[in-house]
Amino acid sequence: MTHCAEPEIVSDTNNQTEQTLPLDGWHRALGARMVPFAGYSMPIQYEGIMAEHLWVRSHAGLFDVSHMGQVMITGPDADIALEALVPGDIAGLGEGRLRYSLLLNAGGGIMDDLMITRTPTGLYLVVNGAVKHADIAHLTASLPASLELNHLEDRALLALQGPEAVDALASIIPVVRDLVFMQANMFLWGEEPLWISRSGYTGEDGFEISVPAAHAERLASQLNALDMVKPIGLGARDSLRLEAGLPLYGHDLDETTSPVEGGLTFAIAKRRRADAGFPGAERILAELADGPARLRVGLSVEGRQPVREGAEIFAGSSPVGTITSGGFAPSVGAPVAMGYVTAGSAAPGTALEAEVRGKRIPLTVATLPFVPHRYVRKGAAK
Amino acid sequence: MTRYFTDEHEWIEVEGTSATVGITDYAQGQLGDIVFVETPEAGTVVTKGGDAAVVESVKAASDIYAPVSGTVSEGNAALADDPALVNSDPEGSGWVFKLTLNDPSELDGLMDAAAYQEFVDGL
């Protein structure tokens, strides 16, 4: 018995050179299965992906995402300078707010997707672990010398996600209830300042918590001691984000895909469309006007057989695209997938097929997300 | 009846020239939640060490190899509706396929239960 399809979440890093993260021993003590990911040894699961996934949808799950890059950019007009690299409205981002954005290359391809927060001291970025060093090199080379860029390697990053995440975190830090989706602030946990945002990568309500590495284990243990909290591995993180329709960089997005193809036009601000001052604006504005040649879509899969990354998609005998993420969706109770298809095959309801091991599996283009988002937004009842 | 094990974590239980094949408890634990099993159809000819079936967990698809050469007589139809049988009873009702052996001497190189346990303990 051997793997014939690489687990999607496991990157092809050399396991001789894995680094350890601040919570490495904590994960192992809890019985996590560790795998190489983004150059680090990371927990892929504890009790099992299915149980962990369903726990997050009904209670609260604690994720260690310390492999992600945390970067602080400080200095005059850092927002304006960063706008030269991303299509979002960063100048208009209020203090304590965060925004999803994209680092673009000159051809309008996506170098990474990231979160940008305006803090009282500067712009705080969270970027993907697998490409963080390339991102930092790009930022360093592209931003003016008047700005300072700090890679916050002395901080861990935890995510607490699920409908009970707010009760769990508020039992330790009551005022986090005041945050709504895509807001962030500094909170004191005892004497330790934590940078906490109400955001995440599961489609559920929840928080992301930047904590000094030296205190990460104590915080993780305090949260994990709560009845409603269980530790969750990268396996469930991947199935949760897939159900939530959220793209994974390096799989659903890469240097060849544009924000329009990726279905991320919400990240291209109105003012930025008018000023066209972001990399690849020519291509991206043309795609906005005329429609892209291909588009990221959700795909419902008929039957029980999962359709995975790399499978070719057909409309009849014509190849129309490729699966970029796929697997079993525990909350849907069936396999689901995402992929890129030609514009003519992208309308919801379109019947397509994927080829898996020589067999055709029926697919239907579906509206994303597969599982509704449950973010707590401003104005919603608390 | 004699049960043998492979270093690819399949088991094969032999009675005369008929045999039943599945994956071991260790293997199902490594794979995690099984969500789909592609069993071979009756009449499929398999060769020792060759692909015979596929088990899919939430995360990944894995090949099951034929422990010996032969002709498939039956795939486990119960796995179509309940693939998790491979997790809950891997060495019993979660069997994957049955076959008729070509050459019983191919069993000679396989492990018995004690040898397999020693093999797994060393992993």
Image (cartoon, coloured by chain):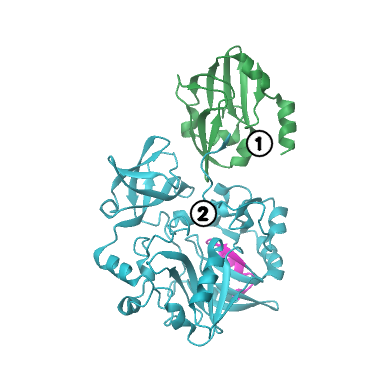
Chain colours: A cyan, B green
- Residue A65, image x and y in percent? 59, 62
Residue A214 lies left or right of residue A200; in this view the side is right
Circle 1 SS class: helix
Q: Amino acid at mark 2?
A: Asp
Residue depicted at 50% across the width and 55% down the height:
A240
Residue A238 got which mark? 2
Q: Label 2 crowding class (10 Å Cα cut-off): few <14, some 14-19, many 20+?
A: many
Residue A51 lies left or right of residue A315; in this view the side is right
Q: Does A381 lie within the magenta span?
A: no
Asked if labels 2 and 1 touch by Cβ distance under 8 angstroms, the answer is no
Kindly indicate the quadrant of the structure image that contains residue A185.
bottom right
- Residue A193, image x and y in percent? 65, 78
Q: Which residues are magenta?
A: A157-174
Kindly indicate the quadrant of the structure image that contains residue A302.
top left
Which residue position holds label 1? B26
Residue A80 visible somewhere in the drawing: yes
